[in-house]
Image (cartoon, rainbow, N blue to C red):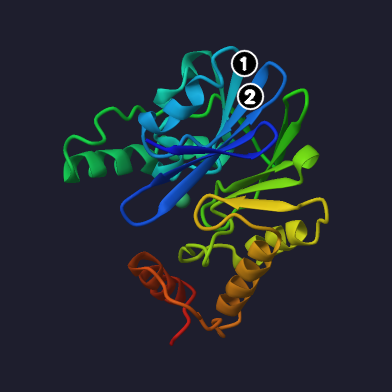
């Protein structure tokens, strides 16, 4: 189950430790309406939210369709819920999303049996806004880590929910991804002085310096001059850095 903590007024963060890394989602509680940003990796991860959302209309929004961000939706009252995702996120529910679940259930019988896939019921192209009364949430497409990646901005709280577009120590970069567009998307938010708090799905919460360091990392891959990694890395991020260098065609 996830750990719940308050980040700001009516803004809650849920974090769960997976085997190799942690993943984080958010709950924004408005006036009679709430938005869940990512449902994390298992239906039980949503349990800490249930009391808080008992009497409100619910919207679930996916940052992207990677398993650790979407497998918990069945733990929410999702039958009466709008599930928002990018058009490419919905497409993935017909391609890699069920394949990943099958593979993980086969590799490890038991722990993932309760997972039910809940696809987006509403899609968008560039951006969409959800009004929660006391706050509004605008979700913006920012492809790169995956084609369906999005960020969510809450101007009333100066809050950017970054999903997997930025993370600490650095993002996971697939082969052939649109590095230039990814960098430009992050630069836009890094230059936006309304953004006070950046909440990535993996790694520390902070300010816009998280965006800046991700931009520098991606620019290094783009230019064939990878940034030097200082400080210790977990096995997961050591392997990720190696894979990122290979994906970008950078020799060490
Ligand atoms: Zn992730």
Say above or below: 187 vs 10: below
Residue at 64% over, 63% down = 210
**Residue 70: x, y in percent?**
44, 37
x then y, percent, for residue 33: 66, 19
Q: Given contact means CB atoms under 8 Å apart, are the residues at marks 2 and 1 in contact?
A: yes
Please, which residue is most extreme toward the right here?
193
Residue 92 x/y as whole percent: 45, 40
Of the numbered discs in the image, which one, if any, rests on residue 57?
Answer: 1
Residue drawn 76% across the image and 30% down it: 135
State whether label 1 is within 8 Å of ligand 1.
Answer: no
Q: Is residue 11 above or below residue 57?
A: below
**The C terminus appears in which quarter of the rendering?**
bottom left
Q: Secondary structure at mark 1?
A: strand
Q: In the image, is 240 to the left or to the right of 202?
A: left
Disc number for residue 34: 2
Taking 147 as reference, is 122 above or below it? Answer: above
């Amino acid at each position: 189950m996830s750990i719940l903590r308050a980040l700001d007024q009516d803004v809650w963060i849920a974090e769960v430790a997976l085997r190799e890394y942690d993943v984080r989602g958010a709950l924004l509680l408005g006036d009679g309406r709430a938005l869940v940003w990512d449902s994390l990796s298992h239906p039980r991860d949503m349990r800490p939210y249930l009391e808080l959302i008992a009497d409100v209309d619910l919207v679930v929004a996916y940052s992207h369709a990677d398993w650790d961000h979407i497998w918990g939706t069945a733990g929410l009252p999702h039958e009466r819920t709008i599930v928002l995702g990018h058009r490419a996120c919905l497409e993935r529910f017909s391609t890699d999303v069920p394949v990943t679940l099958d593979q993980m259930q086969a590799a490890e019988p038991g722990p993932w049996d309760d997972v039910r896939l809940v696809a987006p019921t509403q899609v968008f192209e560039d951006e969409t806004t959800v009004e929660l009364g006391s706050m509004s949430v605008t979700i913006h497409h920012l492809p790169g880590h995956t084609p369906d990646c999005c960020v969510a901005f809450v101007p009333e709280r100066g809050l950017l929910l970054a999903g997997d577009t930025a993370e600490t120590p650095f993002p996971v970069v697939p082969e052939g991804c649109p590095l230039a567009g990814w960098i430009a998307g992050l630069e836009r938010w890094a230059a936006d002085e309304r953004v006070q708090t950046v909440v990535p799905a993996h790694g520390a919460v902070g300010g816009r310096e998280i965006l800046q360091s991700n931009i520098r990392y991606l620019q290094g891959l783009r230019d064939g001059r990878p940034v030097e990694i200082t400080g210790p890395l977990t096995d997961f991020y050591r392997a990720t850095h190696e894979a990122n260098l290979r994906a970008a065609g950078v020799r060490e």
